[in-house]
Amino acid sequence: MIGFHPLASLGAEVSGVDLRAALDDATFALLHRGLVEHQVLFFRDQDVGPEHHLALARRFGEPVSHPAYPTVTGHPEINVLENTPEKPPKIDTWHTDMTFMEQPPLGSILRATVVPPSGGDTLWASLFGAWDALSDRLQRYLDGMTATHSFAHGFRHSLAEAGGWDRLGDAVRANPPVHHPVVRRHPVSGRKALFVNRLFTTHLDGVKESESDALLRFLFDHLETPEISCRFRWRPHSIAFWDNRSTLHRPVNDFWPAHRRMERITIAGDRPR
Ligand SMILES: [Fe+2]
């Protein structure tokens, strides 16, 4: 029997499911409901391979590859996120994945393949919790506003490196800035989520730059409130599946220079409304 065991105000560990087996309709429905409700699901001791990882993702939608990351040989849908002594981690910022797209992903499923001896946890935070904790006055100000999200902004440090434009120039041209509502409604639950993030959101549309900068700075700090976050300690054969429509996340890069390797499948989503 499938069970959900909440970790904090968001996040739940899932018991009673074997991801090596095909998900029947009843189990899929429970997982889907659990994902929307708990926002990030954690699975332990799932000794699965890329084919099971893909089968789980495909139950929820079409995989989309990230333009900036390498992929698993033979599986172009699976991105590899790997850090070694020669390759330090670069992302140390809270973010929602790929909000530089017109239709950012529904979610991502991250599978640990090499876990460092200590550290390397991942943090998630709730965009629902962030919205709910704002005053009525600020909610009224933000509701109906849009913000600009940019791939080039999120990857500006990589672009500034030697050869950065050679590697990422095509992705910059393929992903011009997009506009998303600052407050989006979850397409399944209808709950309101504060949909901005420090990595990709450049400004609030239609207001003075100084006003946008000050408000975004406040909102980014607000999104990092511990009370709306959870932290997951990876072990071999751990999997995390997050709802990218209602969360943001960040890695904790305290493990480097140890080796950490993750495989990620990102699932196509809809246009935020
Ligand atoms: Fe991410």
Image (cartoon, helix red, strand yellow):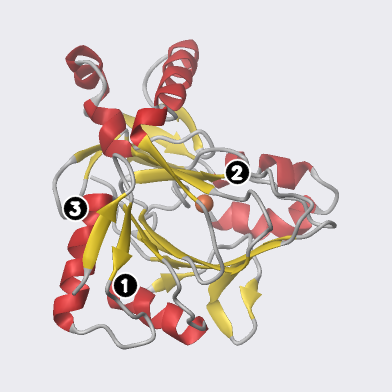
Q: Position of residue 14 (x, y in %)?
A: 30, 64
- The residue singled out by tag 2 in the image is 252
Q: Residue at x 44, y 76 (%)?
A: 46
Q: Earlier in the sequence, mark 1 or mark 2?
A: 1
Query: In terms of depth relative to the viewer, which is nearer, 219 or 165?
Result: 219
Q: Nearer the viewer, mark 1 or mark 2?
A: 2
- Eyeballing the image, is 133 above or below 190? above
- Eyeballing the image, is 114 above or below 54? above
Q: How many marks?
A: 3
Query: In terms of depth relative to the viewer, which is nearer, 8 or 223?
Result: 8
Amino acid type at mark 3: Pro
Q: Position of residue 141 (x, y in %)?
A: 24, 17
- Eyeballing the image, is 146 above or below 214? below
Q: How many residues crowd around disc 2 within 10 Å: few (fewer than 14), some, or many (20 or more)?
A: some
Q: How many residues crowd around disc 3 within 10 Å: few (fewer than 14), some, or many (20 or more)?
A: some
Please say whether residue 194 is visible from this viewpoint: no
- Disc 3 + disc 1, Cβ < 8 Å: no
- The residue singled out by tag 1 in the image is 61
Amino acid type at mark 1: Gly
Locate the C terminus by quadrant. top left
Q: Of helix, strand and loop, which one carries label 1?
A: loop
- The residue singled out by tag 3 in the image is 187
Q: In the image, is the residue at mark 3 within 8 Å of ligand 1 by its beta carbon?
A: no
Q: Position of residue 57 (x, y in %)?
A: 37, 74
Seen in the image, is 136 located left or right of residue 179?
A: left
